Image (tube, rainbow, N blue to C red):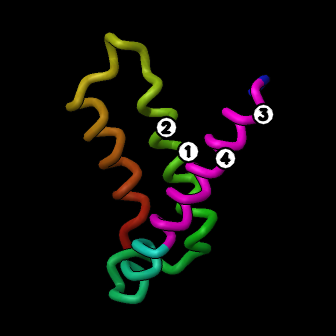
Amino acid sequence: ALDEDIAKACEDEFEYLVSSFEKVLLLGMKEGAIRQTDAKELAAFFIASSWGILSRTPKSSTKEQFLRDMEYIMIALRA
């Protein structure tokens, strides 16, 4: 990021998403639906992976492919 303002805005948004998703993961862990792990690290991995999935080429960036990719991640999370 060459523009400091844009870099800061992206970082702030990433941290907000991670913090929000961390809360969801902790609830899932408490209920036994998600295996116990470092929720913050897992949230950061999930958000970064989701952004990566969304950056696929237009030809491979279908709704169906996104859902399949998300399913792989969810399988790995299950307790």
Q: Nearer the viewer, mark 3 or mark 2?
A: 3
**Mark 2 sits on what residue?**
51
> How many residues crowd around disc 4 within 10 Å: few (fewer than 14), some, or many (20 or more)?
few
Q: Secondary structure at mark 2?
A: helix
Label 3 amino acid?
Glu
Q: Residue at x 46, y 75 (%)?
A: 23
Q: Residue at x 56, y 44 (%)?
A: 48
**C-alpha gap between disc 2 and disc 1:** 5 Å
- Find the residue positioned furthest to the front: 5
**Mark 4 sits on what residue?**
11
Q: Secondary structure at mark 1?
A: helix
Q: Which residues are magenta?
A: 3-22
Check if mark 3's residue and mark 4's residue have beta carbons within 8 Å. Answer: no
Image mark for residue 4? 3
Figure check: 61 above or below 43? above
> How many residues crowd around disc 3 within 10 Å: few (fewer than 14), some, or many (20 or more)?
few
Q: Earlier in the sequence, mark 1 or mark 3?
A: 3
